[in-house]
Each structure stands twice: as structure tokens, then as C-alpha cells.
Amino acid sequence: FKTAVALAVAAIPEGLATVVTIVLSLGVTKMVKKNAIVRKLPAVETLGSASVVCSDKTGTLTQNKMTVVKTYTEEGIKDFTGDDSVKELLRYFTLCSDAEIKGEGNERVTIGDPTEIAMVEASLKMGESKELLSKTYTRQNEIAFDSTRKMMTVFYNTEDGIYSFTKGAPDVIMARCNNTFADAKEANETMANDALRVLAVAKRKWEAFPLMLESDQIEVDMEFVGLIGMIDPPRVEVKDAILDAKKGGIRTVMITGDHVTTASAIAKQLTILEGDQKAVTGQMLNEMDDATLEREIENISVYARVAPEHKVRIVNMWQRKGKVVAMTGDGVNDSPALKAADIGCAMGITGTDVTKNAADMILTDDNFATIIAAVKEGRGIYNNIKKDVHFLLSSNIGEVITIFVASLINSLGFISLGVPLMPVHLLWVNLVTDTLPAFALGMEPPADDIMNEKPRPKDESFFAHGLWWTIIWQGIMVGTLTLTSYIYGNNVSHEIGMSMAFMTLSAAQLFHAFNIKSTHSILHRTIFNNKYLWYAFFIGLGLQFTVMYIPGLNTIFKLVALDFPYLSIALLLAVCPIVIVEIVKVLKRIFFKEN
């Protein structure tokens, strides 16, 4: 009965569930400090296997700090300097916006979308504020912007009559105007090629306010006024993050509502668009059937002028190719794509509540680089969980081997060994000297070269790359050393043999944690980068000596205080896992180098 109980205790890694949950929770806490709030615990693990990141451009890859730098009217393209020649153009842009700039003390407070704020700021430079314009322009009604129309229209009552002003995507606006300037399309392309975000504005005079606000009846027959080009510089840290992602086998794809030329120019600056890779529009995407898109998707790095349904289709197609997809979004319309992605990343600053609720992770700084930092942490956490499973299972197999082999020898009748370890010994090992190093291994910082590894396949087994065999042979190693210690001591007395086995098993597992810490040699420079593992080692060793050498406690555990010769043999056997595993690591390095 004692043997059966001991085997049951030895076989079950009692601390595993607790350790894994705590490791995931600690990972979430670390990510918060790096501006990523993980809403769903399993997403921490999924992040580590991300192989495609579909990112919005504005605010995520760029700074979302728009500034008007060029204007285009019938006089041609000009650098914006605040002269009166473009005063009327910027007035119409400002009137067709919801942004406001208010002064509070010595500071100005901006309210609204960064693109519209840039327009209002440009008008302010020429002495026209919204408050001043409201004296002659009375706002009456509007047709709000949406991502399908790519336009916004506002109605005003003026001294000169009723006008509607419409701003939006240049190609869409120009297609609905009765007039355009001869070189307007070329001007749009020129500014877009300079990585500027280009918007157009048009106006229309009305005899009376229309009763039905239908786009097809309102946003037609307009008079083209001109274009503005705004710069939204890329975030400084994004380019390095994209290069890190490439080293780690992670593909970055830009999905934006901007003009394809503007998107391509930014994508080239950030090394998203390289070589023969393509940039396509939402219209081109509509013309592709699923078979064509599946064939072409790995060659496409930029999607411009896309609608929300396109995002879902892109995510689904990458998943069909077996990729783990992360998707960013901020608007309500992005929610389906975030739900469809393996990891939905909502914007914490500009994101809506609906988007945040649909996401697995929230970026509190709306920064693409945060995603790659989170992927790095995710990979580290996944590796740490594997280390914990490796450590706890190999330790438990060592315990099972010790009990089982001794019982087998006893049953064969050649020699009477008795039970090497009692259930209380195994419980102590599993709950104290096992669990402390396991927690410490879970806090191991990600390896410096972790982003040089390729993402693990979606269907890869947790025990891939020979982990099962490693766990088994290392468990046999720990069990054999423990049994050797027991047999040596048992020749003197059963109590000494049991005490030696207990000391060898506990200490061997404490030493073995350093083997599992890294694939590098134990003498590698990272040996001191995890202070918690050292704390666990010394605390574990201290507790082990406490229960063995303090009178009363050793009686409860049915142990004897080992004399120095027996203690030194038990500890010498406990150090052997370090030597054996180091030899195996050297042989592996030689083998892989030769191959």
C-alpha cells in the first residue's frame, strides 16, 4: 500500500497546473509594463507563434501627427507657407470637419481626428479659426464619413446662399465633380509618391436644403476646389521592429484606407514593401477570386483603399495558408477582423469600446513596435512553460523510476531493498524543492536570440523536436542516481539509505533546473541573468538541510542526520546531472555543426 501511494504521488506533478497559470499571469504583468494589455490569458501563448501581423498604417506604423505641407489649386502644387492663395481651400477643409482647437491658459487643447486637426491648424496659421468662421457660416446638417464612401459632407447657410462642402479621397471626389483641373490626377500622384496623405475638397451650391440626405443625390455634380498633402511621419522605432520581425520569420502586412501610392511610399520607407512584392487596392481585391488570392497573397504586402470586409478576407486567407495572424484595428468596423484573427490587437488610445471588447490584446500606445515586443515576450513565456513542463515531468519520472525499480527488485526476490522514499518525502519534493525552481524558470527572461527563431507551426506538438525523449532519458538519469544513492546507504541501514536518496533526489532536481534554464552551456554568460533561480536553489537547499538536521523535524520525516561521508556522496551524485547534460549539449553542438 505504501509503495502504491508513493508511486501515485511520484507520478502526478501536483504543482504543474499552478506553475503554468502563475507563469502566464506573470507574463501578462510584464506585458502591461510594455504597453500591451492581454485580455485573454491563452493569447500570451498564441502571441509566441504569430507569423503574420496585419497592421493599420495611421497611428500604428506612423506617428498620427498630421501636418499640412503641400497644397494644390488651379495654380498648381505649392509648399504650404500660410499665404492667402490657399486660404479659401483650407477654409472649406476646416468647415468640413468636426475637429476643434481650444485655448486653455497658455496651452491649446485639440479635440478630434488628427487629420482634421491638421486642417484646422493650417487655417489658424492664416488667421481663420472655427469660431471666426461660424459668424458667417452656419452649420445645418451633414452626411458623416464612412469607410465605404470615403467622403464626408457638411451643409452651411451663408450670406451667399446654401452650400455643401465635401472632403475625402481624391479619386472618389474627382469622379463626382463636374470639373477637375487638367493636372489634378498627376498632382495627386506626385504628392502621394512623396508619402503624403492626400485629401480633396469640393463644393456645391443649393437653392434649398435637400430633404433626403442620400449620397448618390448629394455628393454629385460638385465643383472641385483642390487638394492638400499632409505628412504623417513613420514612428522612429517601427522600422527596427519590422526588421526584428523579419529575422523572427514574421511577415508584416500593411492594410490602410489611404491611397495606394501613399501607402506604398510609407511601406518602402519601413521595408514592408520590397523587391517584387505588390501593393493592391480594395477594388483589385474584389476582382480576385479566392483561388487567385490564395496564390498571390504571399506576394502582397500592402492593401490600400480597403473596406472592413476586405480585412476579414485577408485574415482568413492567411489562416488558410496555415499562418497564425495578428490583426490591428481601432474602429467598430474592424471588430469582425479582430475576431477572425488569431490575435486581435485593439488600439488603446483611438480604439472604440466595441473594438477593445473584441480584441485579445490592447495596445495602450497604439504602436506597432509594441506588437513585436509582445511577440518576443510571448515566445519567451511559451519557452518558459516548456521548461517548466520539462523540469517537472523529468523530475517526476525520476521519482517513479526510483520507486518502481526498487519495487521490481523486491518482487523478484533477489534482494530486499524496501521502499526508497516515503509518500511524505515525495510530497515534500513535489511541492517544495520542485515548485520553487519551476516558478523561477517561469521568470526566465527571453533569450537575446529568441527573435532569430522562426515561428512555430500552428499544429506543432508541445513535445516536438525530441522533447519527450529528452524528458524520459533525463528522468531515468535522476532516478538512477537516486537509486544508486539509496542502495549505497541501504547497505549500512535503511534509514541512512532513505535519507541519502531523499537528499540526492531533492538536490539533483535543484541542480537540474540549471540544465533546463538554457540550451547553452551552464557556463554561458546567462547563468546569472535569473536571480530568482538562484534564490530558489539556495532556499530549496536550505529547506532540505533543515528537515534533515533539525531534531524533531527529521523524526517527522523519518530521516537521520547524515554524517559527512554519506552527505558528500549524496551531494556528489546530485551534481552528476550537470556533468551528464553538459556532455550531451557538447555532443549535440558537434553533431549539428557537422550537419
Image (spheres, helix red, strand yellow):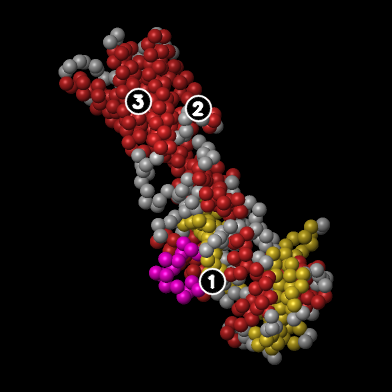
The image shows residue 230 at horizontal and vertical percentages of: 70, 67
Please, is residue 493 above or below residue 188 in the view? above
Mark 3 packing: few (<14 Cα in 10 Å), some, or many (20+)? many
Chain-order first, disc 1 or disc 2: 1
Confirm whether residue 355 shows in the render.
Answer: no
The answer to which of 63 and 114 lies nearer the viewer is 63
Identified at 40% across, 13% down, the residue is 567
Residue 505, quarter of the rendered image: top left
Mark 2 packing: few (<14 Cα in 10 Å), some, or many (20+)? few
The residue that disc 1 covers is: 281
Q: Is residue 131 left or right of residue 349?
A: right
Disc 1 residue type? Thr
Identified at 43% across, 34% down, the residue is 589
| Range shown magenta | 284-300
Please, is residue 414 above or below residue 12 in the view? above
Characterize the magenta stretch by its predominant secondary structure.
Answer: helix
- Can you tell which mark lies on residue 411? none
Chain-order first, disc 1 or disc 3: 1
The residue that disc 3 covers is: 478
Disc 2 residue type? Leu
Disc 3 residue type? Val
The residue that disc 2 covers is: 523
Q: Is residue 299 magenta?
A: yes
Q: Which element is circle 1 on?
A: strand
Residue 102, quarter of the rendered image: bottom right
As measured in the structure, the alpha-carbon distance from the residue carrying label 2 to the one carrying label 3 is 21 Å
Q: Which element is circle 2 on?
A: loop
